[in-house]
């Protein structure tokens, strides 16, 4: 189960606003890049300026707005004819960059370890790449949990609120980053397994029991047909 499954409900709430943005001339790529720029600016400011802990309350606030941005750019692309090859690249790459920037400031928060925060950042990137690689093996773009992008946004938003409201986190909180790393690693495994299973299922039609015709005597082995890779969703 992943928060991603709630995305259709979120999109329904945003659809009237998306229509208005389309009429105003906004494009999906503009929304994607804007969300990335704000994420990077916020993350780097928290990391380098080292503001008071209360500033971490901006993380959950922005995470919620960013989820809306991510839904809006996809709806503009799919529902208003703005799909593009560039948009597909921007959609995947800016998510990884934005996540890294927003997770980075937590390396400065005691008792979190900079090593484990860095590990979560690397694994989060790998999880998105694992999902995006599904179409290369004949599967769909994979969104398996338990810690997909939306789930991680919820977790880090909650951590940001905790940091903002607490003077000091308890020492036991140090275990949260290793646990998150394990959850994201499992997400990578599930996405790879899911893509391979989907590709195998598509390669063999369901209910097909007919034997392949025998090759003529002396003929070499018949070439195996591999399914054509699916085109990834541009958004």
Image: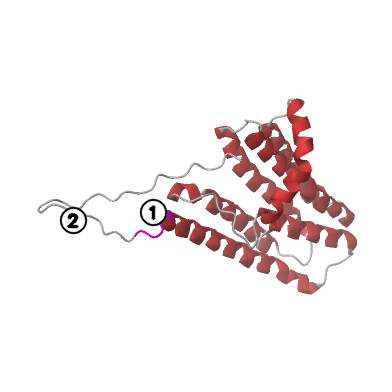
Marks 2 and 1, Cα distance to the nearest angstrom? 20 Å
Residue 25 tag number: none
User: Horizontal placement of 197 versus 82: left or right?
Assistant: left
- The residue at which mark 1 appears reads as 203
Query: Who's the residue at 19% across and 53% down the image?
Result: 221
Q: Quadrant of residue 37?
A: top right
User: Horizontal placement of 42 versus 125: left or right?
Assistant: right
Q: In the rendering, at what x and y percent does residue 188 appear? A: 56, 60
Query: Who's the residue at 66% across and 31% down the image?
Result: 80
Give the residue furthest to the bottom. Answer: 172
Tell me where the magenta segment starts and ends, as one range. Answer: 202-208
User: Horizontal placement of 233 versus 102: left or right?
Assistant: left
Secondary structure mostly seen in magenta is loop
Q: In the rendering, at what x and y percent does residue 136 appear? A: 45, 47
Q: Secondary structure at mark 2?
A: loop
Q: Quadrant of the C terminus?
A: top right
Label 1 crowd bin: few (<14), some (14–19), many (20+), radius 10 Å: some
- Residue 44 can be seen, yes or no: no
Q: Which of the two residues, 229 or 153, is positioned nearer the viewer here?
A: 229
Q: Secondary structure at mark 1?
A: helix
Give the answer, above or below, for where 192 lies relative to 72. Answer: below
């Amino acid at each position: 189960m992943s928060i991603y499954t709630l995305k259709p409900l979120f999109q329904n709430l945003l659809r009237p606003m998306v229509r208005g943005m389309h009429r105003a001339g906004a494009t999906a790529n503009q929304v994607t890049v804007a969300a990335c720029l704000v994420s990077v600016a916020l993350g780097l400011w928290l990391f380098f300026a080292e503001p008071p802990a209360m500033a971490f309350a901006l993380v959950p606030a922005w995470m919620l707005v960013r989820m809306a941005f991510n839904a809006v750019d996809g709806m503009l692309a799919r529902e208003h004819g703005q799909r593009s090859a560039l948009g597909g690249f921007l959609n995947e790459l800016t998510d990884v960059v934005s996540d890294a920037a927003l997770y980075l400031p937590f390396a400065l928060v005691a008792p979190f370890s900079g090593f484990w925060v860095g590990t979560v950042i690397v694994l989060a990137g790998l999880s998105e790449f694992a999902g995006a690689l599904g179409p290369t093996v004949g599967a769909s773009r994979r969104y398996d949990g338990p810690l997909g992008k939306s789930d991680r946004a919820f977790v880090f938003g909650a951590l940001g609120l905790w940091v903002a409201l607490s003077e000091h986190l308890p020492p036991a909180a140090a275990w949260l980053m290793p646990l998150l790393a394990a959850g994201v690693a499992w997400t990578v495994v599930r996405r790879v397994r899911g893509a391979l299973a989907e590709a195998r299922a598509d390669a063999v039609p369901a209910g097909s029991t007919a034997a392949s015709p025998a090759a003529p005597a002396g003929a070499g082995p018949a070439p195996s047909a591999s399914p054509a890779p699916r085109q990834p969703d541009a958004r």
